[in-house]
């Protein structure tokens, strides 16, 4: 084993007498990293037994501070003891003062929702637990319930006859065309062509590949990940892309991702001095990251996830904007990061079924950590409204390798002649609370907490059931089909856990025999609540903006400035760090094709306007501008 490890670590010798009494930065003791997941598995595949974790540490000076405390910590010396956790697990808390708990935990509950929970507590004859109050805040957050889009608008004293959501849905209602499913699933489906599937005859054992024809549906999805990207750009954008991929995996009874898109919108980058359009306004005291940091780190995060998961990022947009007029300061100071994509599924699997009593609740994916706590509620509020500790704790961490394993297991089910999935959802905001409650919202379910995979032994019950550790999928499947899925999961090295059962009693319950706890036990109707209708009042305000003044003699200066805007300039810094053809199905590269042909003629412009040849020529690399 020693010789194998020496070879595995690049012919590095075993340190028998060397002193490790120095300072090192490495992963938090309670969080196994994606790197460790792969390294440990490689060692196990080499026949090395007894290793449960391999982590990477870097030697630093004692006063070193430049590391992310959410991911890493500093150690004095290295030994087996660095992985030991000596923190007492918090017990379930009965919440007597819901308003105070709401303020302390950043749950973003309204006064009406607090009153609702207080009345619910009286009806039940007991205080609600911290898990129940926390869970209600996530399930009924703006992020999950779209209360503004479903709300009532009163403008100039007159109530508008339709909500924003009704306006959006009206188009598809009046012109359904090829729509198969919209506004009721993780993705929308439209009718696709008849296609040929090339896949193994059996997903749970070695088998020959064969061709099978089926009628397809195309999945379409786009969602924002604004708050996490503002706070922690790399993981914010990475988990935005990863979450959007999981949504496409969770369409109908399962569907498959093909290609992704990404949009980044920030305030001006101020990358270089001498840009007059950037000097009109002073940079604000950025709360977490500068616009330049966000543009670089967020695009790195989305690219990294697509590269490692195996989905090409084939299109997108970038826009920087600020404007000041009439005493108003406008700009994308709260970042807009939008992840989107397209995929496909089988028309016969495009609609979910209703779970039956006795169906099993299964989770595919990684362990539970203290990650993404309260993300649904925190992202529904203004950035900076809560303490930095609460906001940073709400940001997820990406693990594309683990998500790929879960996706491969789902692919096996989708490509099989018979897909045994009854219903499927991804683990997004609110973690198990949201995902599993949505799976059984028509029947009720009992979840055994002792069967949930725990990566951090210090988690409280609330943190176990409410964390948003990434790369998990929840499924409802018949009891007789669990063995079939387990065989597929083992082949794809996707961790699988049978964690509960559909009960048919319209209750949603988490229980633990080991801890002798029942952190959540509510009627589904009580949990999903009866949040009051959001009412927004406003008045029409006409703004008249000054016409821009131009001097035609400064045309070259204007043109040079326009060509330097992030929205217009060459996008090589975005397109060239992405594996644009991973998966082998990209027919035309981003930097080639009919859209680019007229742009190449911009070289003529460089001949006419001397001094900007380099800038003008570079625009020919951009397929959009």
Image: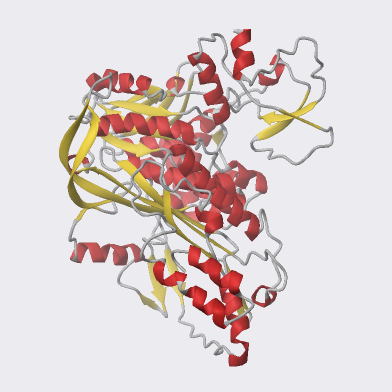
Q: Is residue 402 above or below residue 391?
A: above
Q: Is residue 123 above or below residue 48?
A: below
| Number of callouts | 0
Depth check, front residue: 314 or 21? 314
Q: What's the residue at 42%, 57% (across, down)?
A: 590
Q: Whole-percent x and y of residue 254?
A: 28, 38
Depth check, front residue: 591 or 123? 591
Depth check, front residue: 247 or 238? 238
Q: What's the residue at 38%, 26% (across, down)?
A: 447
Q: Whole-percent x and y of residue 522?
A: 39, 35
Q: What's the residue at 51%, 35% (across, down)?
A: 399
Image quadrant assignment for residue 21: top right
Report whether residue 564 is seen. no
Query: What quarter of the picture does the N terminus occupy?
Result: top right
Q: Whole-percent x and y of residue 215?
A: 16, 44
Q: How is the image coloured?
A: secondary structure
Report whether residue 196 is seen. yes
Q: Whole-percent x and y of residue 141?
A: 45, 50
Depth check, front residue: 424 or 125? 424
Q: What's the residue at 50%, 78% (across, down)?
A: 604
Q: Name the side, left or right, on which 74 lies relative to 90.
A: right
Image quadrant assignment for residue 216: top left
């Amino acid at each position: 084993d020693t010789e194998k490890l020496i070879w595995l670590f690049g012919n590095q010798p075993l340190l028998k007498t060397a002193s490790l009494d120095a300072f090192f930065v490495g992963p938090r003791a309670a969080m196994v990293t994606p790197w460790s997941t792969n390294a440990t598995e490689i060692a196990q595949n080499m026949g090395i037994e007894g290793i449960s974790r391999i982590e990477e540490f870097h030697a630093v000076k004692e006063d070193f501070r430049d590391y992310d405390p959410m991911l890493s910590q500093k150690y004095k010396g290295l030994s087996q003891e660095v992985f030991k956790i000596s923190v007492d697990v918090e017990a379930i808390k009965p919440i007597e003062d819901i308003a105070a708990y709401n303020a302390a935990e950043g749950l973003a509950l309204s006064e009406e929702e607090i009153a609702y929970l207080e009345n619910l507590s009286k009806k039940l004859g007991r205080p609600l637990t911290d898990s129940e109050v926390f869970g209600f805040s996530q399930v009924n957050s703006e992020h999950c319930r779209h209360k503004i889009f479903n709300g009532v608008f009163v403008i100039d004293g007159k109530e508008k006859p339709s909500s924003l959501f009704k306006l959006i849905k009206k188009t598809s209602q009046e012109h359904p065309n090829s729509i198969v499913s919209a506004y009721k699933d993780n993705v929308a489906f439209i009718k696709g062509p008849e296609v040929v599937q090339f896949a193994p005859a059996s997903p749970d054992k070695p088998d020959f590949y064969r061709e099978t024809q089926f009628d397809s549906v195309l999945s379409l999805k786009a969602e924002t990940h604004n708050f996490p990207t503002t706070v922690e750009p790399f993981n914010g954008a990475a988990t935005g892309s990863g979450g959007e991929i999981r949504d496409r995996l969770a369409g109908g009874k399962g569907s498959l991702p093909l290609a992704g898109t990404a949009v980044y919108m920030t305030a001006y980058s101020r990358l270089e001095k001498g840009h007059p359009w950037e000097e009109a306004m002073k940079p604000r005291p950025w709360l977490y990251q500068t616009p330049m940091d966000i543009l670089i780190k967020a695009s790195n995060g989305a690219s990294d996830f697509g590269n490692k998961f195996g989905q090409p990022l084939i299109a997108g947009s970038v826009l920087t904007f600020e404007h000041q007029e009439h005493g108003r300061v406008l700009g994308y100071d709260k970042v807009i990061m939008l992840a989107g994509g397209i995929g496909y599924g089988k028309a016969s699997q495009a609609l979910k079924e209703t779970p039956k009593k006795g169906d099993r609740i299964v989770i595919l994916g990684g362990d539970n950590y203290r990650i993404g706590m309260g993300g649904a509620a925190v992202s529904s509020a203004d950035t900076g409204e809560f303490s930095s500790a609460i906001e940073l704790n709400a940001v997820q961490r990406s693990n594309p390798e683990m998500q790929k394993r879960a996706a491969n297991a789902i692919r096996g089910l989708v490509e099989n002649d018979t897909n045994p999935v009854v219903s499927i959802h991804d683990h997004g905001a609110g973690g198990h609370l949201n995902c599993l409650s949505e799976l059984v919202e028509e029947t009720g379910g009992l979840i055994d907490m002792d069967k949930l995979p725990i990566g951090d032994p210090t988690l409280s019950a609330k943190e176990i059931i409410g964390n948003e550790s990434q790369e998990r999928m929840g499924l409802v499947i018949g009891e007789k089909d669990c063995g079939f899925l387990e065989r597929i999961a083992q082949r794809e090295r996707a961790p699988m856990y049978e964690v509960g059962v559909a009960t048919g009693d319209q209750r949603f319950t988490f229980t633990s025999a080991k801890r002798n706890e029942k952190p959540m036990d509510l009627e589904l109707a009580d949990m999903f609540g009866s949040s009051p209708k959001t009412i927004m009042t406003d008045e029409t305000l006409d703004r008249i903006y000054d016409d821009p003044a131009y001097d035609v003699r400064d045309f070259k200066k204007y043109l040079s400035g326009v060509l330097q805007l992030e929205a217009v300039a060459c996008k090589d810094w975005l397109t060239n760090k992405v594996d644009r053809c991973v998966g082998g199905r990209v027919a035309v590269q981003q930097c080639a094709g009919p859209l680019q042909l007229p742009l190449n003629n911009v070289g003529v412009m460089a001949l006419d306007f001397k001094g900007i040849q380099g800038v003008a020529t570079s625009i020919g690399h951009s397929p959009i501008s």
